[in-house]
């Protein structure tokens, strides 16, 4: 079973500079491939790209969202919610980190489709469209660029290139998430804990957070290791779809959120952009069966609502990675 150690083991991850990736520098591309193959997680330094505008727009959006999350729950629940890719998610909907517990986070999700169409947007986004759109467009560009450079580094051409599975003109479940983990004592369910062990459904995830809590399962030791924030850096992880379309070459990393000490002592905020393949793109899924990206998304989110025991049975929440690693979750 994956070890729940009491000491704060730290994950030792590669750090890439995005400007070097954009330029296609050989050393940066070699590091990108190595990080995706071995850890499925890496830091991405964004400070010397886009004159810092991306990080500035993130700061502005994050400040707005901190105020938005302070609203009463009933007001947040009134947010138009179309799917698990767009709308509000309250705490306690999904399984938690421990047996018989629920999750301890809430989220506002803004789909790329909704942003581009200007439809069904929450009031906070509609009133500050330039701020939210700037960050979402930047995050989308960053992750598509990573895919393109992976294609370059691995010699892919034409429709086999990884970014070809993510056509911008077709619908997808690519989504911008703003997440809030309230202090444990502020939760209606005092058993609420973090975010259960899982892999992400898409190709790449771009995460920015300032507080501790994120853990990745080490493919070497089978232990949970903390991924601390680094100034000016996002945390990027490989997700299921990239694992599928790379014929399992790249590692979809299992991760979770568990605050040090087991309780959230302070409010934790993070922002994630999930790059996902086109809804109708056909993948060779977890068990070798063909599935569309849209179908995999639905299966994945249905599994997040299951108990931990049920998740262990079908392995959908973890993308089957615990089987590959030979550990039990």
Image: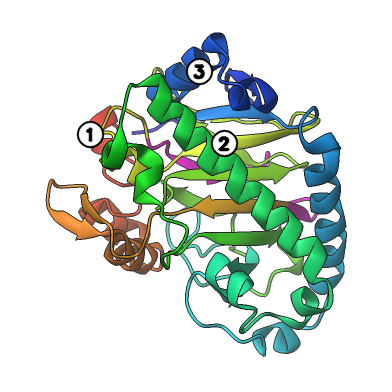
**Residue 116, quarter of picture:** bottom right
Task: Report if the CB atoms under discs 1 and 3 are less than 8 Å apart.
Answer: no
Image coords of residue 102 (percent x, y): 51, 65
The CA span between labels 3 and 2 is 15 Å
Dot 3 falls on a residue whose secondary structure is: helix
Image coords of residue 305 (percent x, y): 40, 68
Task: Report if the CB atoms under discs 3 and 2 are less than 8 Å apart.
Answer: no
Residue 6 in view in this figure:
no
**Residue 228, quarter of picture:** top right
Residue shown at 68% from the left, 39% from the top? 260
Q: Nearer the viewer, residue 129 or 69?
A: 129
Q: Nearer the viewer, residue 9 or 324?
A: 324
Q: Badge 1 is on which residue?
A: 247
Q: Which residues are magenta?
A: 252-269
Q: Badge 2 is on which residue?
A: 236
Vertical relation: 69 (above or below) 272: below
Position of 32 with respect to 162 (left or right) is right
Position of 112 with respect to 161 (left or right) is right
**Residue 109, quarter of picture:** bottom right
Q: Badge 3 is on which residue?
A: 29
Spot the residue most to the top.
27
């Amino acid at each position: 079973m994956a070890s729940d150690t009491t000491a704060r083991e730290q994950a030792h991850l590669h750090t890439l500079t995005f400007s070097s990736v954009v330029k296609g520098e050989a050393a940066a591309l070699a590091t990108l491939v190595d990080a995706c193959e071995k850890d499925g997680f890496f830091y991405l330094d964004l400070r010397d790209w886009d004159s810092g505008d991306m990080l500035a727009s993130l700061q502005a959006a994050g400040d707005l969202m901190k105020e938005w999350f302070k609203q009463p729950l009933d007001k947040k629940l009134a947010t138009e919610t179309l799917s698990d890719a767009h709308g509000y998610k309250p705490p306690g909907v999904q399984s938690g980190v421990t047996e018989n517990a629920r999750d301890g986070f809430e989220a506002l999700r803004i789909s790329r489709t909704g942003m581009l169409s200007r439809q069904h947007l929450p009031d906070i986004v509609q009133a500050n469209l330039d701020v939210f759109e700037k960050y979402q467009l930047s995050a989308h560009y960053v992750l598509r660029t990573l895919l393109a450079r992976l294609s370059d580094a691995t010699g892919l051409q034409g429709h086999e290139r990884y970014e070809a599975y993510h056509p911008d003109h077709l619908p997808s479940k690519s989504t911008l998430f703003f997440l809030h983990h309230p202090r444990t004592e502020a939760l209606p369910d005092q058993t609420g804990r973090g975010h259960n062990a899982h892999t992400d459904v898409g190709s790449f995830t771009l995460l920015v957070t300032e507080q501790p809590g994120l853990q990745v399962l080490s493919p070497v030791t089978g232990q949970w290791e903390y991924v601390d924030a680094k100034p000016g850096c996002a945390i990027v992880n490989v997700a299921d779809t990239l694992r599928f379309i790379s014929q399992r070459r790249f590692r979809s990393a299992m991760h979770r959120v568990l605050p040090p000490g087991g309780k959230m002592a302070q409010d934790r905020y993070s922002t994630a952009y999930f790059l996902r393949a086109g809804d109708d793109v056909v993948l060779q899924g977890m068990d070798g069966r063909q599935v569309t990206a849209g179908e995999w998304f639905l299966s994945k989110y249905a599994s997040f609502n299951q108990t931990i025991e049920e998740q262990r049975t079908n392995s959908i929440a973890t993308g089957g990675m615990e089987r590959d690693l030979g550990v039990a979750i």
